[in-house]
Amino acid sequence: EAQVTQNPRYLITVTGKKLTVTCSQNMNHEYMSWYRQDPGLGLRQIYYSMNVEVTDKGDVPEGYKVSRKEKRNFPLILESPSPNQTSLYFCASSLEQGYGYTFGSGTRLTVV
Amino acid sequence: GEDVEQSLFLSVREGDSSVINCTYTDSSSTYLYWYKQEPGAGLQLLTYIFSNMDMKQDQRLTVLLNKKDKHLSLRIADTQTGDSAIYFCARGANFGNEKLTFGTGTRLTIIP
């Protein structure tokens, strides 16, 4: 089944403890992206990648890192999480411009 | 995203038509999308329209685009309880990186 898989689905962590949210897609898509969803703000793009080793900042990149070493994987790294990064995170992938994104099921992160 | 705006809530009687509206500010947007998010799930691409089109119909869904007013709407005919969800409008950038800017989402509630 064609899909975007994120792990974990839920995560509670403490301030300052490094964490990684994994994302993998099995559709051979070029584009991948991370979004965060917050009430009243819709979805805001954190980082995106147009291909292996090609990444760029989205609208809210502060406090996040990404890497794209393989086409299928696009992990999101929080080196020192803070409570304002408590949010619902979505990974998404797209074949090319105009096809729209296929979204993962989301990761609900709570930083205490 | 401030440059994509939607009303937060809409209530419609079962069997009536729902019309969800969206306005955007960036006239260079090439693609415009509608996504549906059901509770606890990721976003599902419903439909999209290219900026050189005025209308697109797909079964119960009709998308209307008024480029002059930068206004996009999604009409759902014969609204059913399964249509209850949050609907997001999104615009695509014009430079091939599939960077989508989302609205805040409209929560559609169906009244039996």
Image (cartoon, helix red, strand yellow):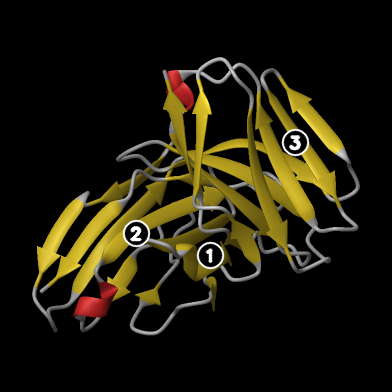
Amino acid on which disc 1 is placed: Val
Asked whether B38 or B94 is in front, the reply is B38
Q: Secondary structure at mark 2?
A: strand
Please give the count of numbered marks on the rendered protein: 3
- Along the line of sight, the residue nearer the viewer: A42 or A75: A42
Report in which chain the residue with disc 1 lies.
Answer: A
* A86 sits left or right of A16 in the view: right
On residue A37, the disc is none
Rate crowding at label 2 as few (under 14), some (14 to 19) or many (20 or more) other CA atoms within 10 Å. many
Disc 1 to disc 2: CB gap under 8 Å: no
Q: Secondary structure at mark 3?
A: strand
Between the C-alphas of marks 3 and 2, the distance is: 28 Å
Asked whether residue A96 appears in the rendered view, the answer is no
Q: Chain of mark 3?
A: B
Q: Which mark is on residue A89?
A: 2
Please, is residue B80 above or below residue B41 in the view?
Answer: above
Q: Residue at label 3?
A: B63
Decide: few, some or many residues near mark 3? Use Cα within 10 Å; few <14, some 14-19, many ≥20.
many
* Position of A91 relative to A47 (above/below): above
Percent across and percent down for residue B80 are 50, 18
- Camera-nearest label, 1 or 3: 3
Of the two numbered discs 1 and 2 in the rendering, the one whose residue sits closer to the viewer: 2
Q: Is residue B61 left or right of residue A3?
A: right
Residue at image point 33% right, 83% down: A63
Where on the picture, by quarter, is residue B92?
A: bottom right
Q: Residue at x 39, y 45 (%)?
A: A104
Q: Which residue is mark 1?
A: A52
Respond whether the residues carrying marks 3 and 2 are from the same subunit.
Answer: no
Calculate the distance from the C-alpha at mark 1 to the C-alpha at mark 2. Answer: 21 Å
Q: Are marks 1 and 2 on the same chain?
A: yes
- Of the two numbered discs 3 and 2 in the rendering, the one whose residue sits closer to the viewer: 3
Can marks 1 and 3 be said to lie on one chain? Answer: no
